[in-house]
Amino acid sequence: MKLTLDYRPREAFLPFHNRKARFAVLVCHRRAGKTVAAVNDLLIGALECKLDRPQLAYIAPNYGQAKRVAWEYLKQFAAPLIEKINESELHVTLKNKARIFLLGAEKADGLRGMYLDGAILDEYAQIRPSAVSQVILPSLSDRGGWIVYTGTPKGKNHFYNAYKKAESDPTQFSLLLKASISGILPQAELDIFRAQMDASDYEQEYECSFTASLKGAIYGMEMDRAETEGRVKEYELDPNLPVDVVCDLGFTDDTVLTFFQKSKSQVLIHEVYSNNEVEWDTYLDEMESRDVRDVYLPHDARAKNLQTGRSIVEQTLRRGYRPRLVPDHKLRDGIAATRKLLPFIYWNLPLCSGGIEAMKSYRREWDDKLGCYRDRPVHDWSSHVADCIRYLGIIFSQLPEQTRPRIILPGEDERAGANYAFNLEDLFNDRRTNPGLWREQ
């Protein structure tokens, strides 16, 4: 059976469609036509795959976005090839029995067990990196599947890292389409939008600048400073210091565990771990495997679980830990405390890479009607990590004695254990006289 595709690619995308590389990164300006190119690349891959019953996927940051952006394009271009359309589950079956799915990365664990012969991750800067490394990439492994990371820049994050890696690796394909070079949009139109838009917005959206500032970024300067000062690299745990953990709780949303050590003048975040839709015992197992001492929980961890009848605090106590509650606080106060603490934090790579990208991506949302940023940050994949680090900021704030994040177990000397309330000015002075503790690996 000979199947042909009714698609005439724009000249700028010909190198992309003709690539031989298994891994590719496609950085495109707005309205370049990358979604049309992506959908047709999946169709090309479906027709060229020699394996039985190929499966390929277009994956957006969330399911609704995948449907809005790509579903009509897929049905349009696949029309001559389609045997069956499944509207409820957003996939088409072609006449050669290949299937193409539209998926959302926000529920990545639901994709476990699925095999893929090819995948395109659109707006990759907005997709949680762990969803790719833990779920999507493994789905390609047994069939030698290929993957494309595509989107428009949103600061120097994991999308930027993927592009720089592909750019420097001859076995990978990379393509950067700037509006001033691609020739896709008329120059007169670009001039109009350049005059109407904020300069950094224009550079990011139309000139594909990764260095244009991420609008509304809350910790952008602090995280840039950490990299500039060399506090983002591989570090070994200090065997003389305990490992503690602070937690942000979720279920369908991510639960985040941040494992850290504290010296007199520094805080090492050794690992940022996240998962979702698993029971609390799974996280307690993770803590046991890392020999955690103290567990810091949000103030609402005392709430009873309707299924088990026990709170997170009670379940944690049953496993032999002494949970400490992070005091309830206003969001703005937590962000302020985090900003004060960030200059004293060291980040261990690669176990904190996803956490670092989340902190860079955490941002406030722009309100077009009011013409200002909203008070509350955007709730997306980055906010769960940022919330967890915010709890760390509260832990290390100068707190009154009666509100320190501590639960005293029955029979325990209330003077025992670590005291993590301290004055950040004293911490700064200590760090100047004791500049290095953790050894680089």
Image (tube, rainbow, N blue to C red):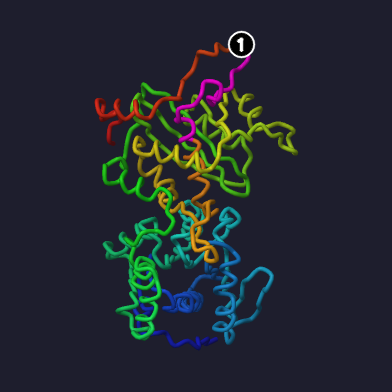
Pinpoint residue 175: horizontal percent, then vertical percent: 33, 71
Give the quarter of the image for residue 320. Answer: top right
Q: Residue at x 27, y 35 (%)?
A: 440
Quick check: can you spot residue 25?
no
Question: In the rendering, at what x and y percent does residue 61 appear?
Answer: 52, 62
Q: Would residue 45 be counted in the magenta stretch?
A: no
* Residue drawn at x 28%, y 36% as measured from the top left: 441
Tag 1: Cα neighbours inside 10 Å, few (<14), some, or many (≥20)?
few
Vertical order, 241 against 4 (above or below): above
Residue 335, horizontal then vertical, whole percent: 47, 42
Q: Secondary structure at mark 1?
A: loop
Q: Which residues are magenta?
A: 392-411
Q: Nearer the viewer, residue 26 or 69?
A: 69
Q: Position of residue 351 (x, y in %)?
A: 40, 42
At a point 73% along the width and 35% down the height, the residue shown is 308
Majority SS type along the magenta span: loop
Residue 406 covered by magenta stretch? yes
What residue is disc 1 on? 411
126 to 67, vertically: above or below = above
Can you say whether 351 is above or below 70 in the image?
above
